[in-house]
């Protein structure tokens, strides 16, 4: 069974600074996807960034980037130039890829990290 | 921008009552999901639905739960006889294909069982 661990329940960062959120996972699968979702106080979860396990290059989306270490099963999220609107719960999630190349959508989430960006 | 819409935003129900949570997925999406998040805990997968049938379900999704796409637009989660431990935030999500692509989540329905 797959598990996702986020070891930092809460973090804070000053506006404009950089913060890194940690995520580790455990799986015997070789092909899978990893995600970071953001859940602001409005409660709707929003996809921040996605990484495909077979790609060695780390995914980047504007101020958000990941450090994907497949051998170490680590998938950290770096937020550069933090903004007040980045304040939210951040969830790391895992999804395996089925043999036919598709997926059933069973996202396995970590417990989340509550990020507060302070002015 | 298209979005997944859930109603109601908050529902209070008495233990033992049936409750139906409603979701309108994004119109061209083919895969639908329900997740739940008990307060203070992680988001847990309940069920995925494709081509009018359940494609995968978790251990949480027992006989008390059912899903339906009654009219081609709504996607519902029914809890037949609610228990106190069913109190949680329930999220609906949808995706164009098997969720290799982005799964879009609704804003959630907070279910409180009293």
Image (cartoon, coloured by chain):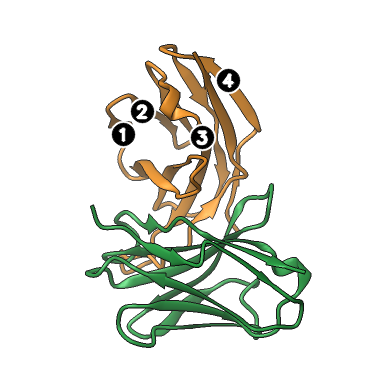
The numbered mark, 3 or 1, whose residue comes first in the sequence reads: 1
Q: Chain of mark 1?
A: A
**Considering only vertical position in the picture, is B86 above or below A60?**
below
- Residue highlighted by disc 1: A59
Chain letter of the orange region = A
- Does the rendering let one see residue A61? yes
Q: Mark 3, chain letter?
A: A
Judging by the rendered image, the residue that carries numbered circle 3 is: A88
Query: Quick check: B7 left or right of B1?
Result: right
Q: CA distance from mark 2 to mark 3?
A: 17 Å
Relative to A103, residue A84 above or below: above
Task: Looking at the image, tell me whether mark 1 or mark 2 is earlier in sequence order.
Answer: 1
Q: Please tell me which residue lies in front, A35 or A17.
A: A17
Q: Nearer the viewer, residue A115 or A53?
A: A115
Q: Position of residue A92 (x, y in %)?
A: 50, 42
- The Cα atoms of the two marked residues, 1 and 4, are separated by 23 Å
Whole-angstrom CA distance, mark 3 to mark 4, is: 11 Å
Whether B12 is drawn above or below B80: the answer is above
Q: Which residue is mark 4?
A: A12
Image point (59%, 34%), residue name: A113
């Amino acid at each position: 069974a797959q598990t996702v661990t986020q070891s930092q329940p809460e973090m804070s960062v000053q506006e404009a600074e950089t913060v890194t959120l940690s995520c580790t996972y455990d799986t015997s699968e070789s092909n899978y996807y990893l995600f970071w979702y953001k859940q602001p106080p409005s409660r709707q979860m929003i996809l921040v960034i996605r990484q495909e396990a077979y790609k060695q290059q780390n995914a980047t989306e504007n101020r958000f980037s990941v450090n994907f270490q497949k051998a170490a099963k680590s998938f950290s999220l770096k937020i550069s130039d933090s903004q007040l609107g980045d304040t939210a719960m951040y969830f790391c999630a895992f999804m395996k890829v089925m043999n036919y190349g598709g997926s059933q959508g069973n996202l396995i989430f970590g417990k989340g990290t509550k990020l507060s960006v302070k002015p | 921008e298209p979005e997944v819409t859930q109603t109601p935003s908050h529902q209070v129900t008495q233990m033992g009552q049936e409750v139906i949570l409603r979701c309108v997925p994004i119109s061209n999406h083919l895969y639908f999901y329900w997740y739940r998040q008990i307060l203070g805990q992680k988001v847990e997968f309940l069920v995925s639905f494709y081509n009018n049938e359940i494609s995968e379900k978790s251990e949480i999704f027992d006989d008390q739960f059912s899903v339906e796409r009654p009219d081609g637009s709504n996607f519902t989660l029914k809890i037949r006889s609610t228990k106190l431990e069913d109190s949680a935030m329930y999220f609906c999500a949808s995706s164009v294909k098997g969720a290799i692509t982005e799964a879009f989540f609704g804003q959630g329905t907070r279910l409180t069982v009293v």
